[in-house]
Image (cartoon, rainbow, N blue to C red):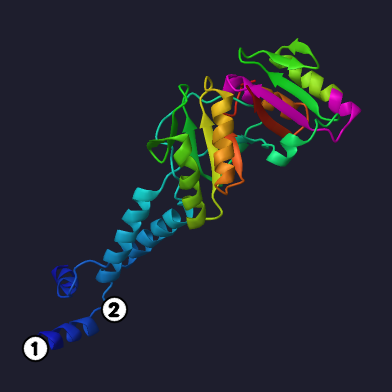
Amino acid sequence: MQATRHTPASEDHGIDLAPMLDFTINLLIFFIITTSFIKEAGITVFKPEAITAENRDSGNLLIAVRENGEIWMDRNPVEIRELRSLIERLHIERPDDSVVIIADRASRAGVVAKVMDEVRSGGIKDIAIAADPGAGG
Amino acid sequence: MGMRRRSEQAHESSHGIDLAPMLDFVINLLIFFIITAVFVKEFGLNVNRPTSFEQNKPDDAKSIQIQVLNNGEIWIDGRAVDVRAVRANVERMSAINPDTGVLLLANEQAPTGTVVEVVDQVHLGGIYNITFSTSN
């Protein structure tokens, strides 16, 4: 008993790291695959409900519109005038981005339409309006 | 002296290479991906925006026009309708002309919640070609 315990202690490192490494690499691969670098809006708004809302897995640029007309993107409030240049810059960095506009239930349709126009003129054509799927309608 | 001892020991041990530096590197990568991982599942509705070219064009007689007023009232064909009646209206009109689209004309002050409800009802009525336009 004593003799078998002594054998690994004579090595450079006491424990066998290989199983831990296997496990860690599996975890790493999982996180690499699932990561998608979403730019969150940074605020929560009261979203409208819609039965026919589709899953937007590719939507990774979230723009929130509050009920008072404020626009939030990437955890910062932005002016409608800056939105176009911001979108243009992000579109050059990653051309396959798509936008989801998270508009508050009580926000004005005019603001949402303006945001859509600015995003389109910034180069991103894939735009959706966020809605909660469920018993709405 | 030290080098020689180290290589001898490595030769003695069961695995040939030292895994520790690789493990450090892998764990750093792992921590980076754990921190940056965001699990957001967003659901949404797709609507078209008319281009400036389409806005100049006279209204297509075939498309169904739905108006949303600033107080949230919904008008189809000159009649105020309830949001639950939108689906039936759309179904009837798409039965007459199956490849018709919907022009959703919302007032700029109209609440987005009502607009999204109308879009949802039109989808349920079987039309996915919706153009979203605003007026003041």
Identify the amino acid type marked 1: Met
The local secondary structure at tag 2 comes to loop
Q: Provide residue A50's location: percent of width, then percent of height.
A: 62, 26
Residue tagged 1: B1
Q: Provide residue B53's location: percent of width, then percent of height.
A: 73, 41
- Density class for disc 1 (Cα within 10 Å; few <14, some 14-19, many ≥20) is few
Tell me if residue B57 is in the magenta stretch: no
Q: Nearer the viewer, residue A68 or B114?
A: A68
- How far apart are labels 2 and 1 at the CA level? 20 Å
Answer above or below: position of B131 versus B4: above
Q: Residue at x 78, y 36 (%)?
A: B57
Q: Residue at x 33, y 55 (%)?
A: B32
Q: Nearer the viewer, residue B56 or B42?
A: B56
Quadrant in which the N terminus of chain A is drawn: bottom left
Span of residues in magenta: B93-117
Instruction: Spot the residue most to the front.
Output: B56
In which quadrant of the rendered view does residue A73 lie?
top left
Quadrant in which the C terminus of chain A is drawn: top right
Horizontal side of residue B88 vs B120, given as left or right = right
Q: Residue at x 55, y 22 (%)?
A: A108
Label disc, if present, on residue B17 of the rendered structure: 2
**Which chain does the numbered disc 1 sit on?**
B
Do callouts 2 and 1 mark residues in contact (Cβ within 8 Å)? no
